[in-house]
Structure formats: C-alpha cells, structure tokens
Amino acid sequence: MQHGMIGIAAALGIALAAPQGAIGAERLDCPEPAKLGPAATGKLASDLVPNPRALGDVGVLTRTVPLFREHGFSDADTVNYLTALFCPVVRDDGSLSATAKTDKVSSFSSAVSDIVYRQPR
C-alpha cells in the first residue's frame, strides 16, 4: 500500500523561502503535476480536480478516485497526482508552520492511499 506514495514523498520537501520583511516565510515545495508524468496526464489530473481545496473533504476525495481510474490513472499515479494537486492548498496556508504543512500533506497522502487501495478496481 505504501508504494503509491514513493514518488510523491520523494518530491516533497521543506525549503526556506526568501525572507519577507523581518520574518522569513517557510515554504513547502510541491511537485508539479506535469512533472509527474506526461504533460497531458498532468493537465488531465488538473482538469479532473477543478477545485483542489475541495479534496480536503473525504467525501469529495472518495468520489474523485473512481474518476481518475475511469481516465486510466494507475493507483500509484492517482495517489501522486491527487497529493500534488492538494499540496499547494497546504503550502499557501499561512497559519501552518513548515512542520505542520509537511504533516498535513503526509496525512493527506496517507488518506488518499487508504481510499485508493481499499476501493476495488
């Protein structure tokens, strides 16, 4: 079940952005969907999820997985693309620390994996 997260986990990291004013901003580096595979697949993934913020809702996430399957995404690609699409939502949340951002993306990726690998194909 963990193999679906390997590609995305390798692409995620925390970096310090250039200081803004007196306080340095912490930034989560998110993988770009187009760089996870063929550009057309990254575009399709983005088209299938018009509002990545909605992926934070488990019901929306559960309904999105079959949509990715219908369009030929493998289980691993489904986990990776959904995580890549949700990551900027977390990255842009100024209320979270760098550690909290990493934890939230990791938890999201685990939730996606649970949904993907528990739903029959």
Image (cartoon, helix red, strand yellow):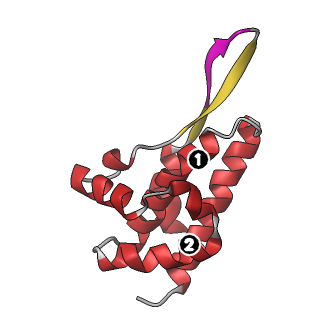
In the rendered image, the quadrant that contains the C terminus is: bottom left
Mark 1 is on which residue type?
Val
- CA–CA distance between discs 1 and 2? 15 Å
Q: Is residue 90 magenta?
A: no
Which secondary structure, mark 1?
helix
What residue is drawn where x is 32% and y is 79%?
Answer: 70
Instruction: Magenta stretch: give its range.
Output: 15-21
> Residue 92 appears at what percent x and percent y?
62, 38
Q: Is residue 53 left or right of residue 67?
A: right
Report which residue position mark 2 lands on. Answer: 60
Tell me where residue 6 appears, x and y as whole percent: 49, 58
- Magenta region, main secondary structure: strand
Of 56 and 113, the residue lying toward us: 56
Residue 1 visible (yes or no): no
Which label was assigned to residue 89?
Answer: 1
Q: Is residue 28 left or right of residue 42?
A: right
> Residue at point 57% right, 61% down?
54
